[in-house]
Image (cartoon, rainbow, N blue to C red):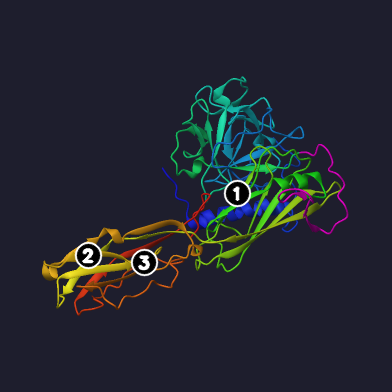
């Protein structure tokens, strides 16, 4: 069966993820790492989900890790927990010997996994507690066991789920692509799934990897410092106080369209320390953040797949607005505590709309006194010259015409396009001297509306008719956001 996550449940989960992600950032509360004091033999506790390190940003296609086998940060594999979205207190583990999903203890190595590249886009999922055990379906059912390097049954694709669950994967087998990890039946299995199943969606909770080499000693600086562009280079090149900050700051990419923004950090950066990326969103002139944007999103950099941060602001009043992004990078100090450095970013956002105008339906109700000739005229939104449709009302008061030429549409248009609202009128007989001009009111922004339902007189006669049409507006979202 499909699961429709209630709004409160969805929002609650995403808030939980953000709070969990923020523990490594001094701007929020701090906590000890859950990777400490492993107790593989401890029985699993019940209750709420274990709070770990952050879930990752996702691409919209199956991920392909950097070449070279096991995912490394300077020779150290990056460690993850696999957490179910439908039941966030359930984590994939082999604590009892067989692979299962359930509550875990804070230090269980049996619930920690590394990802190894088998081939581009194909990954092996290896247990940390028993490193000879890989998830596979070689015998038909899902197990964790020793495998052979060429087994496609032990290889998996991780595909990002579309927003609002922007931190979520589906994990499906390469040998049998219709077999995906899920807990739909109550227990962990690999099987056929439906697109809407939250039981088949998983977050990757990143655990801090051991430090291989100490970072260069940072210069004396205030707790938060702004990275400055390096001179003599093209684009926003930054020189940070540590090589990790420099690498991440210069790798940040962003794009925006309408009121949607995406910030990405590509995979493959070789860092000496875990770096946390925290982005605060501060738009001007907006009431609320909607369902696809939070005031702050925080993730730990993931060398395997990179990171992605999405924000889709709601339409609001439809006016352009400035967006300030407060991007804070954090990494541990050698003697304890953390360094924080800031990469500010500003962008101007303009709402985009698809606008369509329906054909016009003309219905005569009061006959014209002088002639049966009718001329319907209008200014389209993109023209200062009017169009005409001429016909004869010889059918009397039953005369009705649908004017297809009146229809108009434009995609991804903004107030900067200087389109105007449609103006329409009609005349009887010869040309009238009482001709209106184009509207001075911008077509954007706007809400869907219909024409005046009442009777409308000809500009040069007492005949009366209805002129019915509809102007429809669709506010556009991009990068997979769908904010309301």
Q: Is residue 364 left or right of residue 129?
A: left
Q: Is residue 478 above or below residue 133?
A: below
Q: Magenta span: helix, strand or loop, mainly?
A: loop
Mark 3 vs 1: CB contact within 8 A: no
Q: Is residue 43 visible?
A: no
On whether residue 222 falls in the magenta region, the answer is: yes
Pick whichever of labels 3 and 2 is earlier in the sequence.
3
Q: Which mark is residue 357?
A: none
Q: Is residue 15 above or below residue 437?
A: above
Which quarter of the rendered picture does the N terminus lie within? top left
On whether residue 215 falls in the magenta region, the answer is: yes
Which residue position is annotated with label 3?
Answer: 385
Which residue position is annotated with label 2?
Answer: 390
Which percent across, then down, holds residue 191? 47, 32
Pick whichever of labels 3 and 1 is earlier in the sequence.
1
The image quadrant of residue 267 is top right
Q: Is residue 339 left or right of residue 476?
A: right
Residue drawn at x 57%, y 38% as measured from the top left:
101
Mark in the foreground, 2 or 1: 2
Mark in the foreground, 3 or 1: 3
Q: CA distance from mark 3 to mark 1?
A: 70 Å
Which residue position is annotated with label 1?
Answer: 47
Residue drawn at x 52%, y 43% as measured from the top left:
161
Secondary structure under the numbered disc 2 in the rendered image: strand
Q: Which residues are magenta?
A: 210-238
């Amino acid at each position: 069966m499909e699961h429709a996550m209630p709004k409160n449940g969805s929002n609650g989960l995403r808030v939980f993820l953000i709070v969990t992600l923020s523990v490594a950032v001094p701007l929020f509360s701090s906590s000890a790492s859950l990777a400490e004091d492993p107790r593989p033999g401890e029985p699993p506790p019940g209750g709420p989900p274990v709070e770990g390190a952050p879930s990752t940003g996702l691409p919209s296609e199956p991920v392909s890790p950097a070449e070279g086998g096991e995912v490394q940060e300077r020779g150290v594999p990056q460690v993850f927990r696999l957490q179910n979205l439908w039941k966030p207190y359930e984590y994939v583990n082999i604590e009892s010997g067989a692979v299962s999903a359930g509550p875990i203890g804070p230090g269980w190595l049996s619930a920690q996994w590394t990802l190894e590249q088998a081939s581009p886009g194909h990954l092996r999922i290896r247990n940390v507690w028993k490193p000879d055990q890989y998830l596979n379906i070689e015998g038909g059912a899902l197990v964790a066991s020793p495998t052979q390097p060429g087994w496609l049954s032990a290889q998996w694709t991780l595909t990002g789920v579309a927003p609002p669950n922007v931190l979520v994967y589906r994990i499906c087998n390469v040998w049998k692509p219709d077999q995906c990890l899920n807990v739909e039946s109550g227990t962990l299995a690999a099987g056929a799934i439906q697109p809407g199943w939250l039981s088949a969606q998983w977050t990757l909770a990143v655990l801090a990897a051991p430090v291989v080499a100490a970072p260069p000693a940072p210069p004396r600086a205030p707790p938060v410092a702004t990275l400055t562009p390096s001179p003599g280079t093209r684009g926003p090149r930054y020189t940070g106080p540590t090589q990790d900050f420099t690498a991440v700051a210069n790798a940040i990419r962003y794009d925006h369209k309408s009121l949607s923004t995406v910030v990405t950090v590509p995979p493959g950066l070789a860092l000496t320390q875990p770096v946390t990326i925290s982005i605060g969103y501060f738009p001007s002139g907006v009431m609320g953040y909607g369902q696809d944007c939070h005031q702050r999103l925080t993730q730990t950099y993931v060398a395997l797949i990179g990171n992605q941060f999405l924000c889709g602001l709601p339409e609001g009043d439809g006016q352009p607005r400035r967006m300030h992004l407060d991007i804070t990078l954090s990494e541990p100090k050698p003697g304890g505590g953390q360094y924080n450095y800031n990469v500010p970013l500003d962008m101007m956002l303009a709402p985009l709309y698809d606008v369509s105008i329906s054909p016009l339906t003309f219905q005569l109700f009061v006959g014209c006194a002088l002639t049966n000739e009718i001329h319907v005229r209008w200014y389209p939104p993109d023209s200062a010259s009017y169009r005409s449709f001429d016909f004869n009302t010889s059918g009397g008061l039953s005369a009705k015409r649908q004017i297809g030429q009146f229809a108009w549409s434009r995609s991804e248009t903004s107030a900067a396009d200087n389109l105007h609202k449609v103006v329409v009128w009609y005349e009887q007989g010869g040309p009238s001297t009482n001709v209106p001009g184009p509207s001075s009111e911008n077509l954007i922004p706007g809400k869907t509306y219909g024409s005046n339902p009442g009777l409308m007189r000809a500009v040069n006669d007492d005949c009366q008719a209805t002129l019915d049409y509809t102007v429809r507006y669709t506010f556009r979202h991009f990068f997979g956001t769908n904010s309301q």
